[in-house]
Structure formats: structure tokens, C-alpha cells
Image (cartoon, coloured by chain):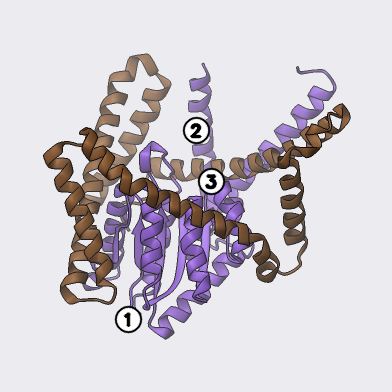
Chain colours: A brown, B purple
Amino acid sequence: MKRIVSIVIAITTGILVISAIIFRPQLNPILSLILRWGILIGSTAALVGIAILIKTHYQRIAVGKRGFFFSLIVVFGFGISFLGGMLLGVDNPGYQKWISSIQLPLEISFLGLLTLILATTGFRLYRLRSWSPLSISFGISAIVFLILAMGYLQALGDSRLDKIIEFIQRIPIAGGRGILIGMGLGALVIGIRVLIGVERPYGE
Amino acid sequence: MNEVYVWIAIGVIGLLLIFIKISNGKDNSGKIRSIPAFDKLDQINAKMLESGKRLIIGLGSGFQNFLTSINGIIGLQAAKSTAKQSLLADEKPLILSGDGSLGSMSQVALAETYKSLRAIEQYKPENSFLAGTTPISYAASVMAESHAKENGGLFLVGHIRPEMMLPVDLVQNKDLVCVVSADEPGTQAICFPNNDSATIGEELYGFASRTEHQPWLTASLKLQDLLRILIVVSLVVAIVLKLLGIIL
């Protein structure tokens, strides 16, 4: 019974949302109502998720699992931020400054680390993938587009060369679109499977 | 008017899917070309069972910040099939989500899977949780979990963002196996040279049909191929017509 109820809810919601998008002005109230419900359910799910996360870290601290010190930092950081937000309010400039002065340097250093790792990527390519037509073409195209992105060739001011560069720079867009079409079709078919009730991500 | 075309297109594609499914009968072979990344995943699962290590499955930031990505569903399928495969394993897979909805759905999916296998006692809520609410915090959390000694491999599947290259790098430095099946072309481009087990393009959708063997999944793949051929033919025809000056 529970399974049938969830399937009916999923199919009805899907059809209502698509119908509301198509018959926009008439069904706008229904669309906004469903979206509001969606936001509410999504936010509740996030709260449940955070509660489970804290519980998991608390259990790790309680049993003294290896690396529990990191769990201690997570729980402590969460507790302080949560209390600060509740007492001062999330719009409080002091609270926002406090949170962003911790979050921003952390995120920026993380991205800096990512940049370093990506810079070493090229050296790994041939060790991991060996010399295959795909890896060779990948390496060549990476070098070509790095040179083009420097802008030295464009600075020469040759109109014929500019046209060739423009053409070359359009090739990845075509490739990217090809991949996106494939991904889009896959997503569309999954959506239709959910809509007709054969795909049930919410159950077995 | 354009919206009506969308409605018609969805209806036609839905009918085509049903038609292909009916014409296939009970064909659930799911025979598709070999995808090296998923072949490796089968080997990892077998290895995990022997070595008593666990597999970390990163579902990515599925429905986060309204950048809805239905591909999170593929991650849920991965979580379910890995749970089935590791029923006899000492260490159960750890499922990390980057979004509250996906986290809750993975909990429900895991519980339902164990229930269907009559092994609900194997279900532990701490084996699936929301690992971070922002993309960076999610990547950091996956890194921290990947560092644990009981970890034997990492499988990232669904809406995976480029920051996830950091846990991928960590896992590779520890000589563990990592499989990345991302829906973002940017992540695919970053992971291709870094990882010998990354899927490209729509290979992501081949995951479920390899493990689940359901007629609907086989029909879906056939429909995707058919639609791709139709799009290619339409593009070529449009180019020819444009060259001939018939359409502007």
C-alpha cells in the first residue's frame, strides 16, 4: 500500500508540474504551490540530513573511533555556528562576517589546492592512460588550446589567422554539445521512467 | 506554442519507450558494449568482499540549490546495487550525499533494499548520510572519509562537480581504486586524464542496465540510441538544407 501511495504521489506531482509549465498563466497557482511544498520538503530533508550527520559524528566521538578528533571539530563548529545563528540571527552583519571570515579562506585554499592538482594532471595522463589515440589527441588539444588562450596569436592582427583560431575554438563547443545532447536524452528518459512509475528512486 | 511542442515531444518519447518495451518482450539482457570504468567496479566489489574493506559511494550534489540534476537517481541505483552485492561483506558501503533530499532518499533506498532482501538488520543509518551542504564542504567531507583505513575504494556517481578531483587525487595517492561517473562535462574532462576509470558522456546511463537487468532499462537504452540517431540525422539534413539555401 505504501509503495502504491508513493508511486501515485510521484506520478501526480510530475504530471501536474509539466502541465503547469505548459499551461502557464492558468495553472500558475498550482505550480507555485507545488514548488513551495518542494522547497519545504527539501529543507526538512536537509535538516534531517544534518541531524543524521551530527548523530554519526557524535557516535564516533562516543566510541573513540580513530580520527574522532575531526568529528569533534565538526560537532563543535556546527554547534557554535548554529547557536550564533539562532541567537544573533543569520542576517546579523557580525555573524555573517564571522562565518565568512572562516569559510572564505578555507574555500579559497581548497580551490588553490585544486589548481595545483590540475596543473599536475597533464604529467599523469600518459602514465595512467598510456599512449593511445585518445590520450594523444587529448594532450595535443590541451596544448593547442592553452596556446590559443594566451592570446599571442590573436595579437598578431592577421584577419585570416583570426578566422582559423575562431574556427578551432568552436570545435570544443561542438564536442561539448554532443556530450550534452547525450546526457540530456538520458536525463529525459529517466524523467519519463519516473513519470510512468517504472523508476522508483524512493524505494526498492 | 513552444510549450505545446515540449508536451508533444514528452508524450511521443514516453509512448516510444512503452512501444520499445512491449516489442522487446521480456528482453532484460541489457547487453551493452563494455564500459571499462564499470568493469573495474565489478572487480572492486569482489575485492572488497575478500579484503573486508568498504566502498565509499559519493552521490554528488544532486538536487542542490535548485540546479536540479535527475542524474542523482543513477547514484541511488548504484547505492542499491552495491548494497545487494555487499550483503555478505563485513563492511557495508558508505553512501555520502551532498544534498539533503538525496541523503534522505538514499536512506530510504537502502532501507527498502535490505528489507527486500529480508536483511533489514543490515541497515544502519550511519552508513548513509549528508556529507556537506556546500560543494566544497562536501568534497572535504568525502576526502576525510576516503582517508579512513577501512576504505578500499571510491565510486563517485551522479552530479559530480570538478572540486571532487581532490578526493579522487587522495584516493589515487593511497593506491586505492577510484571510479568516476559524472554528468558534468567539466568534471568528465578533468577526470579523464587523472583517472583511468572515468566514464565519458552518456556511459553513466549504462550503469543500471549492467547490474539490474530489467526490461525497462534495456528499452531506455535502445530509446536513447534511437533518439540520438534521429537528432544526428536531423542535424545533417538541416545542414544540407541550409547549404542549399532552402532554409535560412
In the image, residue B83 above or below residue B191 = below
Q: Position of residue B246 (x, y in %)?
A: 80, 18
Q: Which residue is mark 1?
A: B90
Residue type beneath disc 1: Asp
Which mark is in front, 2 or 1?
Answer: 1
- Mark 1 packing: few (<14 Cα in 10 Å), some, or many (20+)? some
Which mark is in front, 2 or 3?
Answer: 3
Q: Which mark is residue A186?
A: 3
CA–CA distance in space, label 2 to label 3: 13 Å
Residue type beneath disc 2: Ile
Specify whether residue B214 is in view: no
CA–CA distance in space, label 2 to label 1: 45 Å
Q: Position of residue A144 (x, y in %)?
A: 77, 48
Mark 1 chain: B
Residue A64 found in image quarter: bottom left
| Pointer 2 or 1: first along the chain | 2
